[in-house]
Image (cartoon, rainbow, N blue to C red):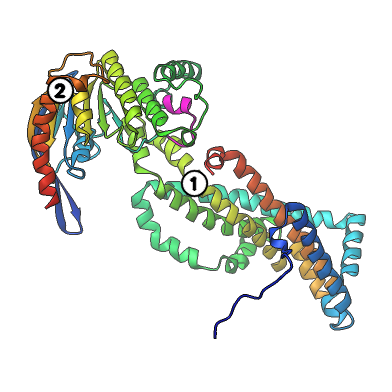
Amino acid sequence: MSQSPPASDAPAAMPFGAGRATMLLWQLALGIGVLLLWQGASGRLIDNFFISNPVDVGARLYRWIADGSIFAHVAATLYATGMGFVIGSVGGAILGVWLGVSPFASRLLNPYLNALNALPKVALAPLFVLWFGLGIESKIALAAVLVLFLVFLNTFAGVREVDQDLIDGARLMRATRTQVIFKVIIPSAMSWVFAGLKIAMPYALIGAVLGEMIAANRGLGYLVQFSGSQFDSAGVFAVLFVIALLAVGLNWLVEIVQGRMERWRIVSR
Amino acid sequence: MIRLENISKSFYKGTTAVDAVRDMNLTIERHEIVAVIGPSGCGKSTLLNMIAGLYAPTRGRVVYKNAPVSDVNTDVGYMTQKDNLLPWRSVRDNVAFPLELAGVPQAERARRADEVIRHVGLEGFEDRYPNELSGGMRKRACLGRMLLYGAETALLDEPFAALDAQLKLAMHDLMLRLVAENKQTVILVTHDLMEAVTLADRVLVCTRRPATIAMEQRIDLARPRDVLNVRFSNAFKEHYDALWERLRVEYQEERV
């Protein structure tokens, strides 16, 4: 049996084709709709104990902001994320460039790096607590290790992808090995490094929050863990909201920096 | 000045050897412009790579100014079909790249680069990036860079193949002028016979892979040559026909 598409005599008013402003309205409407549903369902369909409700969550956020208590936690998490990201990125980039330009070292270390990469890095957390204590250092270490492998893999691939003709061209113009690395290989691999940084940014936050959940007395990870252990679902949702905001903000930051640094790539689009 | 002594080059695809060049002997004099022409994929580019020291010949040796080439030959400028400008650098920074490598201070670099950029007709594009330029403009930038490097020998691997006919003529004219001004030795690989006869002092015809030299023709047209009109002279036609007669054999064998 053949089927014809449903005929319609009214022009389709599809939101997909809508302009930016209209789409923003739709997105807002969706968000408000979900919040209303949540508020409506809470206490009626599902026990308020499990899912709390938007009004309580909002009130909790307001209280934390008003008394300033949330900011110490945000600062701790941001610090661990930022430090972990910087240390991991620098380490990963250096390792990636080094192994990328030395075939001997990369072949030597290849099986070990594969094994380390396959290892769930989160499992290292107890070790870091042992080494670095309960303070912020163990959170930085966890975030840094997660970031390091992602940035390393991307940088390594980027260095391997460098156009050999560009390298040969520079060598023919009397470039030293150091000059080839710094003036051809690294700039050329930059877009790969940035792709790695972009992927790694959320993982820095994951590392910091996870570290705080395992053992800490500060930070958003600690707060979400603490709220959960108090059966305080409004508190858990409030912290999740703050973490999501941080994640969006960090991604936005990476995109801005990338835009600045890669002018020539944006032009080619 | 450049001597190829009995050189052969084989590449290995797995375990089977592919001969790209076989038993080639060739001597190129200082300030000479030599064009190498032959079917595509016959190993002409391999020849240039060996002169540049990027590949070592499997047998035989390349001698450059009485010394065997054993590493990258930094006395040559190499211009490939694919222009290898650095895409993250502006035209000025690309042209000035060899000076930067040599440690020339920033201000002098910019001044000398701008001078050369004017000379190759890229004025006003100093701050553009390679992907904002047309193919012809990128070639001009490459020529400028080679000029600033001051290479005594220019290896040109089908440098103008991707350009349209008019642009090609403009580039031929520019190239001949620059080569004469800078007294360079040139080895030009091409599959355009018109280009070869227009530019060269000597044209070599290569056989199909593995490449050997099948024919050598001295082009005794007067210099400076007018690239627009030189092709209409009888002498040009004689050279062209003689070379074409030999090239046709190669192309015919290729078709079979």
Disc 2 target residue? B236
| Secondary structure category for the residue under label 2 | helix
**Placement of the N terminus of chain B among the 4 image quadrants:** top left
Residue B99, given in percent of the width and then of the height, sits at: 41, 22
Q: Residue at x 51, y 21 (%)?
A: B124
Residue A94: mark in rendering: 1
**Percent from the top left, x then y, of residue B127?**
52, 26
Question: Was residue B198 drawn as part of the magenta stretch in this picture?
Answer: no
Q: Is residue A199 left or right of residue A17?
A: left
Q: Secondary structure at mark 1?
A: helix
The answer to whether residue B201 is above or below residue A266 is: above
What chain does badge 1 belong to? A
Q: Is residue A42 above or below residue B151?
A: below
- Furthest toward the bottom, the residue is A1
Q: Amino acid at mark 2?
A: Phe
Whether the magenta-drawn stretch holds residue B91 is answered as: yes
The quarter of the picture where residue B249 lies is: top left
Give the label on residue B211, or none: none
Q: Amino acid at mark 1?
A: Ile
The magenta segment is: B86-95
| Residue B98 seen in this snapshot | yes
Local packing at callout 1 (Cα closer than 10 Å; few below 14, some 14-19, many 20+) is: some
Distance in Å between CA atoms under marks 1 and 2: 59 Å
Residue situated in front as seen by the camera: A84 or A201 = A201
In the picture, measured across the screen, residue A174 lies left or right of residue B186, that is right
Question: Can I make out residue B2 in this image?
Answer: no
User: In the image, which is nearer the foreground, mark 1 or mark 2?
Assistant: 2
Q: Residue at x 82, y 76 (%)?
A: A51
Contact between marks 1 and 2 (CB within 8 A): the answer is no
